[in-house]
Amino acid sequence: MLLDTYGRQAVDLRVSLTDRCNLRCTYCMPEEGLNWLGKPELLTDEEIVRLVGLAVRDLGVREVRFTGGEPLLRPGLVPVLAACAALEPRPEISLTTNGIGLARVAPALRDAGVDRVNVSLDTLDPAVFQRLTRRHRHQDVLDGLAAAEAAGLRPVKLNAVLMRGVNEHEAADLLAWAIEHRYQLRFIEQMPLDAQHGWDRTQMVTAEEILALLRTRFTLTPEPSAARGAAPAERWLVDGGPATVGVIASVTRPFCRACDRTRLTADGQVRNCLFATGETDLRGALRSGASDAELAELWRAAMWGKKAGAGIDDPEFLQPARPMSAIGG
Ligand code: SAM
Ligand code: SF4
């Protein structure tokens, strides 16, 4: 099992398949520049499947989420997903994507064994989308969402980041739209993980503000706290339910005490936290001929050293060297 000194067990593995992306969201990447990992540095498809298999068989991982960068850009995506879905015991498999290209690939994802997708959508306005992502691809995302729903990858979840003065006024519209389409919406507080280190605490739209914006149109009642478990989103029933909305308050209400995550970057580094400043190199060990037992031991040791919390709101907080797109969000 993947345990740490605070008694937590990691059962949820996030695997980044690439650090590349076809969007340039302002809260994630600079407008231009940002060096991609070279091909030799990336884990091969076989290496990914071997490490995920090890995590599932020997380390107690029950859920695997593939992310990036943009995971749909990985050429071998579907076979990797299918191989992971064929593992015993079979893990839950999900994918976090910006939705571009999803319209084409959604049925293949379902056939490969993907259980769910999370699609990132911050706005209903194509002009705001262009401003936020620096690309004209809004319709592609909407088409991707519709295709995911049609392919039965339900419930389709939506992730939204609100940026002050850019899309915060859309909070209630996004929720109304999500409910109408039966998508489950979660708002994420903006975190200091952008490549250009432009995050500013005073500019962040907080969970409190997000809730206040939603309450201008909806009645929100908390779901029973037991329902949150290790899930980072606090959820509210909208107008008495059954529709819900989630808020991931990583900065103002961190959920580190219940964290059950472990992370594998596209270049084969284990991270015990999104905000960890250190990593454990599994790729080097793997390519030097380490056995599964040796790799498992390295992974266990990496998790044992996990800190109590990320401490983003602490004055001494240090942003990790890698941006979100290279860690896997
Ligand atoms: N490209 C895919 C996507 O956008 O869904 C997957 C990777 S992306 C890094 C994963 C999630 O992280 C997205 O929902 C995105 O909105 C979110 N994200 C990126 N940068 C963030 C930041 N600085 N703070 C909070 N969330 C962020
Ligand atoms: Fe790409 Fe996702 Fe980062 Fe946006 S949030 S730039 S879609 S990796």
Image (spheres, rainbow, N blue to C red):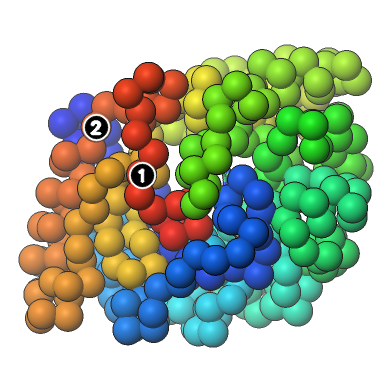
Residue that badge 1 annotates = 320
Q: What residue sits 34% from the left and 34% below the top? A: 318
Determine the image quadrant of residue 230.
top left
Using the image, tell me which numbered label, if any, was put on residue 307: 2
Q: What residue sits 17% from the left and 80% below the top? A: 287
| Amino acid beneath label 2 | Lys
User: Which is closer to the viewer, label 1 or label 2?
Assistant: 1
Q: Is residue 115 above or below residue 317?
A: below
Q: Is residue 282 left or right of residue 50?
A: left
Q: Position of residue 34 (x, y in %)?
A: 50, 65
Q: Position of residue 127 (x, y in %)?
A: 89, 53
Of 165 and 104, the residue lying toward us: 165
Q: Is residue 272 above or below residue 43?
A: above
**Mark 1 crowd level (few <14, some 14–19, many ≥20, 10 Å Cα):** some
| Amino acid beneath label 1 | Pro
Q: Position of residue 38 (x, y in %)?
A: 39, 79
Determine the image quadrant of residue 102.
bottom right
